[in-house]
């Protein structure tokens, strides 16, 4: 009992002990906040990559892709792994040049052009939930809304249609939409042909406003509106000759990842195949599994069906993004090691303070030994004192770290207003809020590490106190 009483008395009366507690507290809080923010970014990144790439991807190694895409899809369904597959979709992905007019000047930029079936692509995930106009629609499409058609007509009116009212235009569109029979030649009526729809990456069609703040919805300034037209230029299959066509913007793709929002554009799969003269060729087949744990078995079977020597590559989404995910994991590990040095500094503080206490209390230690205290008892006093400092500091640090993590966006806004400088620049990350993910196991390991450092730093002073000779300690001046 005397050991606990002495530890508690030292904790209450020593102001240097308060400095040790604050050091441990700040170290634990910093580790929890940094780990939570990095885990939030990592989780958000993994979710986006997983959704955009699906569970398993069968790819062709050439720009022309591989033939008989529909037959390959059916072949996979009829294979032994067919019952483990929830959904599949074929995709054509190719580089392209996007051109549009902005403020009287022609703007040209490179993009990644994807031909997709919007309904099938939504079944494997990572598409309809990122659309702006058709968000989470069960049947997304490239159909151009009436307002966009009217805007396109206003920008490109045929000579015979000048002065046409919107009501008359709506009737004209019904008569002249692609796929419908043309209007009768007598009496002559103006015809209206609408280009195909295109879904643009949100960062292509807009830019993030300078005064963007967390929690605001309208942070993007659009330079390309629904109904504006763009020209896509790519290459045909086989001959590699340029092909191009005009498209009308019908929606935006907003995944909140600038790499995709600033480069991806989507067009109808069948029309892109027709434009590039690909017939039924596709560049990839994306597969969503019922249970991702079956991915190794599915990949092994698919690699036997689509051997690499025939120009195929079968990978999971983690295999495709392996270097990026590994880099994030390594960065997180190195950062944890560096931040643990903060707690190590607190440990050296505990070592110094305990050494001072041993020197100051040498006679008291001698009296305790003369009264019958054992070496182990003396040593346990200092070890218990170190343990108490570590537990109190870790507990306070955990509370502080969790509070900062939960309120980090409010704190960021306050710091931005106070300093006049953006702490979290939304023009770079394209996130509305700072993502966080508090992981209980990480919090536990941080606390155990902090307590272990505090106890470890008290071992040497405790040994020195325990090995003091009682007579020499009593005669110490």
Image: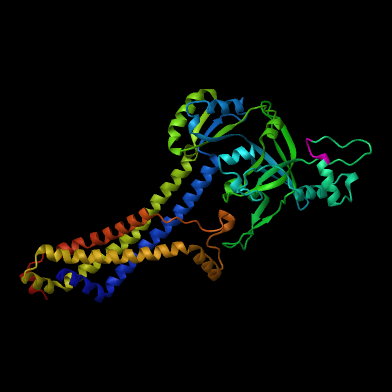
Q: Residue furthest right?
A: 187
Seen in the picture, residue 338 relative to 418 is either above or below; the reply is above
Query: Residue 206: x and y, percent?
Result: 67, 53
Give the residue displayed 62% in from the left and 63% down from the top. 211
Q: Is residue 336 left or right of residue 54?
A: left
Seen in the picture, residue 74 relative to 175 is either above or below; the reply is above
Q: Is residue 415 left or right of residue 114?
A: left
**Residue 349 makes an appearance in the image:** no
Q: Which residues are magenta?
A: 175-179
Q: Which quarter of the picture shows residue 59?
A: top right
**Quarter placement of the N terminus:** bottom left
Q: Is residue 178 left or right of residue 415?
A: right
Query: Residue 336: x and y, percent?
Result: 38, 54
Q: Residue furthest top?
A: 310
Query: Residue 399: x and y, percent?
Result: 38, 65
Q: Is residue 444 left or right of residue 286?
A: left
Seen in the picture, residue 469 relative to 230 is either above or below; the reply is below
Give the residue displayed 36% in from the left and 57% down from the top. 443
Give the residue displayed 79% in from the left and 49% down from the top. 150
Seen in the picture, residue 193 relative to 345 is either above or below; the reply is above
Q: Main secondary structure of the magenta part?
A: loop
């Amino acid at each position: 009992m005397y050991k606990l009483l002495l530890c508690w008395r030292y904790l209450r009366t020593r102001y240097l002990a308060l400095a040790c507690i604050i050091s441990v507290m700040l170290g634990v809080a910093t580790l929890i906040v940094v780990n939570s923010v990095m885990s939030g970014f990592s989780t958000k990144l993994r979710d986006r990559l997983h959704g955009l790439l699906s569970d398993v991807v069968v790819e062709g190694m050439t720009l022309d892709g591989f033939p008989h895409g529909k037959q390959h899809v059916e072949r996979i369904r009829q294979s032994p792994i067919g019952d483990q597959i929830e959904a599949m979709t074929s995709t054509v992905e190719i580089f392209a040049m996007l051109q549009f007019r902005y403020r009287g000047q022609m703007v040209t930029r490179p993009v990644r052009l994807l031909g997709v079936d919007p309904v099938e692509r939504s079944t494997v995930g990572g598409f309809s939930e990122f659309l702006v106009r058709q968000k989470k629609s069960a049947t997304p499409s490239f159909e151009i809304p009436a307002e966009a058609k009217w805007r396109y007509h206003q920008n490109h009116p045929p000579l015979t249609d000048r002065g046409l009212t919107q009501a008359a235009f709506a009737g004209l569109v019904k008569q002249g939409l692609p796929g419908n029979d043309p209007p009768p030649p007598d009496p002559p009526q103006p015809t209206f042909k609408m280009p195909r729809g295109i879904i643009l990456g949100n960062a292509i069609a807009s830019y993030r406003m300078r005064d963007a703040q967390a929690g605001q919805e309208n942070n993007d300034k659009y330079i390309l509106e629904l109904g504006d037209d763009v020209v896509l230029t790519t290459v045909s299959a086989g001959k590699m000759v340029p092909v191009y066509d005009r498209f009308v913007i019908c929606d935006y793709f907003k995944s909140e990842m600038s790499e995709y929002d600033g480069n991806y554009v989507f067009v109808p799969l069948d029309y892109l195949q027709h434009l590039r003269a690909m017939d039924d060729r596709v560049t990839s087949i994306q597969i969503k599994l019922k249970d991702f744990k079956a991915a190794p078995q599915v990949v092994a079977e698919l690699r036997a069906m689509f051997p690499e020597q025939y120009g195929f590559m079968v990978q999971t989404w983690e295999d495709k993004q392996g270097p990026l995910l590994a880099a994030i994991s390594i960065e997180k590990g190195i950062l944890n090691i560096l931040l643990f040095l903060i707690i190590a500094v607190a440990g050296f503080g505990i070592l110094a303070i305990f050494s001072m206490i041993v020197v100051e209390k040498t006679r008291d230690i001698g009296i305790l030994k003369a009264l019958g205290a054992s070496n182990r008892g003396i040593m346990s006093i200092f070890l218990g004192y170190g343990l108490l400092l570590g537990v109190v500091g870790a507990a306070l640090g955990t509370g502080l770290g969790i509070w900062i993590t939960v309120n980090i966006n409010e704190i960021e806004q306050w710091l931005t207003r106070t300093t006049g400088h953006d702490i979290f620049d939304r023009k770079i990350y394209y996130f509305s809020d700072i993502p966080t993910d508090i992981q209980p196991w990480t919090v536990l390991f941080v606390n155990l590490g902090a307590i272990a450092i505090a106890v470890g730093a008290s071992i040497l002073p405790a040994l020195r106190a325990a090995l003091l000779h009682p007579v020499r300690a009593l005669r110490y001046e």
